[in-house]
Amino acid sequence: MTDEISDDDLTRRDGLPKGLVTLLEAFPRAEWGGDPRFGGLAAFWLDRHLAFRDLMARMADDAEAVAEGRMDPEAWRGRLARMGNHLVQDLLGHHQIEDDAYFPQMQRLEPRLTRGFDLLEADHHALDGLLRGFVAGANDALTATAAREGALRFHAGLAPFARSLTRHLEDEEDLIIPVILKHGMA
């Protein structure tokens, strides 16, 4: 048995494996917005990912505000229930359409990136488990007798989930956006 870390493990990797960034080298992230093919699907994809990041940041900020006494606990509970539900439902729908429609289409366009699409789909399965933990943590916070302690526990549990989701979003962007740009996908 080895202690070697797989570059496929969402919770431990720090980017896409080297063989999967060849298109990113041709279409660097810093130049996406200036590419004439940017817009449409590429902009939409990045906007969806930005919305996920924003929801996580807002939930973390709200939990901090409750823990520090700067937000009414009942207002926080309502916001957490709405934002948490929104995040979970949108992520599940986003991942389903990626797995069922976009990834197979993109894989046909770029078969050399098959391992990358498989990696992203595996991330979705890993994120399902992390989402269950997120939901359990949110429900615990919503029902906690002491709002401050519930907010602190939720905030602590949100951090590893947010790290894994952010890693996935960045890796997905680094693989997908260059494919969209290269092939002018609408």
Image (tube, rainbow, N blue to C red):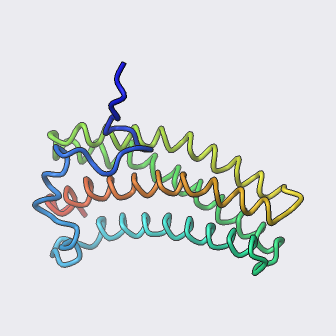
Q: Is residue 62 left or right of residue 8?
A: right
Residue drawn at (20%, 59%) of the image? 178
Quick check: 177 above or below 15?
below
Q: Residue furthest top?
A: 1
Q: Residue at x 58, y 47 (%)?
A: 131
Q: Of all residues shown, which one is farthest toward the bottom? A: 70
Using residue 176 as the reference point, say whether residue 45 is left or right of it.
Answer: right
Residue 34 lies, in percent from the top left, at 18, 78
Vertical placement of 123 versus 35: above or below? above
Where the C terminus falls, by quadrant?
Answer: bottom left
- Residue 46 x %, y %: 36, 67
How many numbered marks, from 0 up?
0
Q: Residue at the right extreme? A: 145
In this orientation, which residue lies closer to the viewer: 93 or 172?
Answer: 172
Left or right, residue 9 beside residue 140: left
At horizontal 32% and vertical 49% (from top left) the residue drawn is 102
Quadrant where the N terminus lies? top left
Residue 76 point in image, percent of width and height: 76, 71
The residue sitting at 44% across, 69% down in the picture is 50
In the displayed structure, 23 sits above or below 62; it is: above
Determine the image quadrant of residue 56. bottom right
Where residue 3 appears, x then y in whole percent?
A: 36, 28
